[in-house]
Image: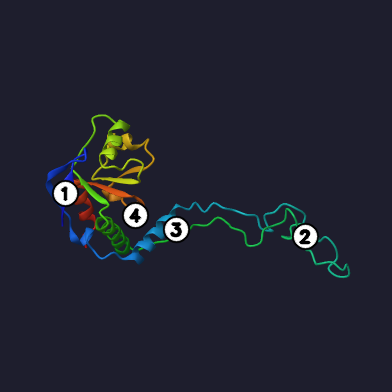
Amino acid sequence: MEVAIFNIKGTQTSRNASLDDTVFGIEPNDHAIYLDVKQYQANQRQGTHSSKEKSTVSGSTKKLHKQKGTGGSRKGSIKNPLFRGGARIFGPLPRDYSFKLNKKLKRLARKSALSYKFKDNNLTILEDFSFENPKTKNISELLKSFQLTGKKTLLVLAKQDENIILAARNLKRIKVVQASDINTYEILDATQLLLTESSVKEIEKIHQN
């Protein structure tokens, strides 16, 4: 697939990029996407929630009154969940929410997400660039050139560029990542995907069958 290459000023160049059909043009697998996004969100959960059960609530374990003959209900101790300040029944406890997926499924999910972006015309190829100084103004002008100011944007680089990362750090709606670090959730969450020429090659290299 041939796609036009743009410069950072938003002008189309005379060159085209050739995208691999097996990465950017597959039939998307929605279930693979669902599982990968579910895993990503589960892995973000800290799981540090904690409530107190009868064994952890402070208080006397003395039986409040005899078992029978009072006309009232049976109560084991002041820690009874029915009392104010008592234990919580089946409350949340610290746990790990993460789970594993095989690499082939995750790769299929990312290729499906990339194919959706290409299909919906939400993918733009930029010629490789860098900034002399890490100024926020540089990234702001780039976004303005593509009418992406205020929109969620994912900028993908082939390798880490400190000036670009620092320039984008103060803007909330843009995220800069390396091609080796992209994930399905961030691809789909972004309104527009900006890929540099060299990052396309890295993505295709990683996601080849």
Q: Could you say whether the residue bearing mark 2 is in a helix, strand or loop?
A: loop
Looking at the rendered structure, which numbered label has been put on residue 98?
3
Q: Which label's residue is closer to the chain start, 4 or 1?
A: 1
Q: Nearer the viewer, mark 3 or mark 1?
A: 1
Using the image, determine if residue 52 lies above or below residue 157: below
In the picture, the quarter occupied by the N terminus is: bottom left
Marks 3/1: CA–CA distance:
40 Å
Which amino acid type is marked by label 1? Ala
Q: Which residue is mark 1?
A: 4
Using the image, determine if residue 30 lies above or below residue 4: below
Marks 3/2: CA–CA distance:
37 Å
Q: Residue at x 32, y 64 (%)?
A: 105
Which amino acid type is marked by label 2? Ser
Q: Which label's residue is closer to the chain start, 2 or 4?
A: 2
Q: Is residue 62 visible?
A: yes
Q: Nearer the viewer, residue 207 or 156?
A: 156
Marks 4/1: CA–CA distance:
22 Å
Q: Could you say whether the residue bearing mark 4 is in a helix, strand or loop?
A: helix
Which amino acid type is marked by label 4? Leu
Residue 168 x, y percent position in the rendering: 33, 37
